[in-house]
Amino acid sequence: MKSEMTLNESVKEAIEIALIRLLNKKDINKITVTELCETAGVGRSSFYRNFESLEDAAVSYVNRIYREYFRNNPVNPNAYKKPNFSFFLKERYKFVKKHRNDFTVLYKNGILYKSLLKMDPEIKAQYLLADVSESRYFSAMVMGFSAGVIEEWVAGGMKESEEELAEITKACLFGTVNSLKDAF
């Protein structure tokens, strides 16, 4: 059973990687499942067994690369506390920069933001350092903010360094919090 799961995971990964390759050449709306499967070297039934759509394969790819990131970089429960927060943000942005080409191709096809928002709950929990089932509104707010920042950074060509973006993020977050406190 375990070898079947490993085989299925390798099939999924082949499809995800083939999708990214094809997205580097053409728009997602011009990619067919047949073409994707030929590029991945798998049958069409393998695609439909694992995914409902090409977007679903993109979401799975984002989950895969974040899962790998968290496996190699365990979350620090003190990441949101000073002075760790800047380091926490910089590390997340370094990860995005490492996958710059993939994030850019997903952005150009209009699926980056959606892919980030649709992360698996277990990945979101690590991403947010929170139990997303207990705090779904917090999760939605932070994921929307984070996905928006990443998308805007990618859209602008990632001109800001990770350090600069971390400072911008903190200023946005804490400026908003302070503004809201004053409003109430």
Image (cartoon, helix red, strand yellow):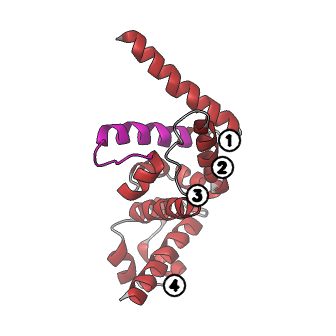
Q: Earlier in the sequence, mark 3 or mark 4?
A: 4
Q: Which mark is residue 94?
A: 2
Q: Are marks 2 and 3 in contact (CB under 8 Å)?
A: no
Q: Which mark is residue 41?
A: 4
Q: Is residue 131 visible?
A: yes
What distance separates the C-alpha of mark 1 from that of mark 4? 37 Å
Q: Which mark is residue 73?
A: 3
Q: Between label 1 and label 3, give the one nearer the viewer.
A: 3
Quadrant of the snapshot with the C terminus = top left
Residue 134 forms part of the magenta stretch: yes
Which residue is most to the front?
78
What distance separates the C-alpha of mark 4 from that of mark 2? 32 Å
The residue at 45%/83% (across/down) is 6
Residue 137 forms part of the magenta stretch: yes
Q: Position of residue 93 (x, y in %)?
A: 62, 46
Nearest the viewer among 174 and 146 is 174
Q: Position of residue 47 (x, y in %)?
A: 39, 76
Looking at numbered disc 4 in the image, what kind of residue is underneath it? Answer: Gly
- Left-right relation of 56 to 36: left
Quadrant of the snapshot with the N terminus = bottom left
Secondary structure of the residue carrying tag 1 is helix
Secondary structure of the residue carrying tag 4 is loop
Disc 3 packing (10 Å; few <14; some 14–19; many ≥20): few
